[in-house]
Every structure is written in structure tokens, then in C-alpha cells.
Image (cartoon, rainbow, N blue to C red):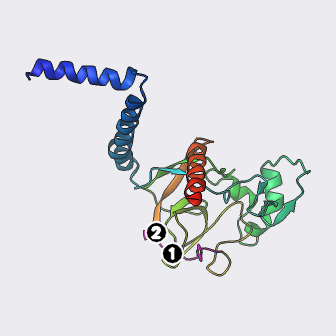
Amino acid sequence: MNLTEIKTKTKQFWNWVWHSDSILSWLVALIFIFIFVKFIFFPTLSLIMGTSLPLAGVESSSMDHKIVENDYGILTLCDKTYLKKDKIIINFDEYWKNCGKWYEEREISKDEFLKFPIKNGFSKGDIIIVWGRFQPKLGDIIIFKPNKESEAPRPIIHRIIKIENGTIQTKGDHNPEQLKSSNNNYRTDETSIKEEQIVGKAIFKIPYLGWFKIIVSDILKKIFSLL
């Protein structure tokens, strides 16, 4: 087979992959997309952003500023609970009424919080764009690897509320308290984070885009649980 024939066959194959309606062509196209995303797109983006995790899907509500239903079916925001019939629109002022006392007790004022990056938090299902080349400072939202004793399955994304002697403390905007090994199921401690645990910081959010992954993941979990 000469070069001309190879080019012709390649062109025919490429047209079949992207223009055919057969199930097989769809499967081949998905394989190509997977290879491109995993081995070209993400490595390139990681190099540009300076982090191993340039895009992060939010899988919990720990940074949400809205009233959210927890695992027990209770509507909560920080340490306050609500009835399902309550229809309360949460803006930043309402958020601060519920959650601000915790920060004020630690000398973080409302005016100071308003100057923090992504001051209104973000929700489950959002996609976060992550930057790796930075010096951590108060108010940054960072992604960090849990402590060695933690059983948390993935990195955590919370806001820095204290930096002292090279040790960083964080808290989820929605959570009533910081995670400590004694107060959560995963034995995760966010009161003693070292810089080597940090993966990057959140610089931008894309709403809702991560829901596709969450829905697919939940469906697969249910399927495997039945097997």
C-alpha cells in the first residue's frame, strides 16, 4: 500500500468515525475523545495551570451559601435548620446572619470576607478552575489532599481562615464548624494543613457543568450495588 492509498483509507476511516450513525462508529469516537482528553487536553492544561488538577468537579455542598438538604433530609445552612415550607432567598447579608458569627469570633469581619475570592461560594455540580502557582493567603479557596489518617476519597476544597507558622486552617463556607478527626466520619482534619498538601486554589467557577459526572457516577454506583 502506497502513501496515497494510506491517505485515502485514513480519510475514509475518519469520515466514518465522525459522520456515520452506526453504534460502532459512536464507540470509536468516544474512545478517541477519551484518549484526547486524558492524554492530550488534561496534561496540557495541567502544564499551563501549574497543578495536577486544573479542573475540579464539586461533589458536596460544603461551600454552598444556600440552604441545602443534608444526608438526613434536613435543610441546613451553617448551624441553622429550616422547614421545607420555608422559602428564603439567601443573599450575602442573609448568609452572614447565619454564618458570620463563627468568622467574627475568629477576627474575620464581614467587610473582610466580602473581599475574599469567590466570596459567594459555589454549589454541588459546579466546575472549579484551579491555579497551582500561588502563595496561600487568608480567604483563598484551596484544594488540598486530606491528612494521612483521613478516609476521605478525594481532595477537599475549602477556604483558608487562618495561616500561622506555616500551618494552614480551612473551613467550608456552608459547614457549621471545621472538620476535625473527632467530628466527621472520614477522620479528616483541616486544622493543620501543610503547604505540600495543597494542590491549587480556585480562581473561577463554572455553574452546573459537573452535574453530568455526578449523575453518571450515582447511576453506576447503584448498578454495581445491585450486582
Residue that mark 2 sits on:
197
Q: What residue type is labelled 2?
A: Gln
Q: Main secondary structure of the magenta part?
A: loop
Residue 149: horizontal and vertical position, in percent? 51, 79
| Quadrant that contains the C terminus | bottom right
Residue 77 appears left or right of 155: right
Q: Distance between the residues labelled 1 and 2?
A: 8 Å
Foreground mark, 1 or 2, reads 1
Is the residue marked by circle 1 packed among few (<14), some (14-19), or many (20+) residues within 10 Å? some
Residue 102: horizontal and vertical position, in percent? 76, 69
Residue 109 appears left or right of 181: right
Res. 13 visible in picture: yes
Identified at 34% across, 44% down, the residue is 44
Identified at 54% across, 75% down, the residue is 150
Q: Which amino acid does label 1 sit on?
A: Asn
The secondary structure type at the circle numbered 1 is loop
Between 36 and 195, which is closer to the camera in this rendering? 36
Q: On residue 147, which mark appears?
A: 1
Specify the quadrant of the image occupied by residue 62. Answer: bottom right
Specify the quadrant of the image occupied by residue 80. Answer: bottom right
The furthest residue to the left: 2
User: In the figure, 4 relative to 206: above or below?
Assistant: above
Res. 141 visible in picture: no
User: In the figure, 136 relative to 204: above or below?
Assistant: below
Identified at 73% across, 56% down, the residue is 111
Per the rendered image, the range of residues in magenta is 185-196
The secondary structure type at the circle numbered 2 is helix
Question: Tags 1 and 2 in contact by the CB under 8 Å rule?
Answer: yes
Q: On residue 14, which mark appears?
A: none
- Disc with the residue nearer the chain's start (1 vs 2): 1
Between 227 and 107, which is closer to the camera in this rendering? 227
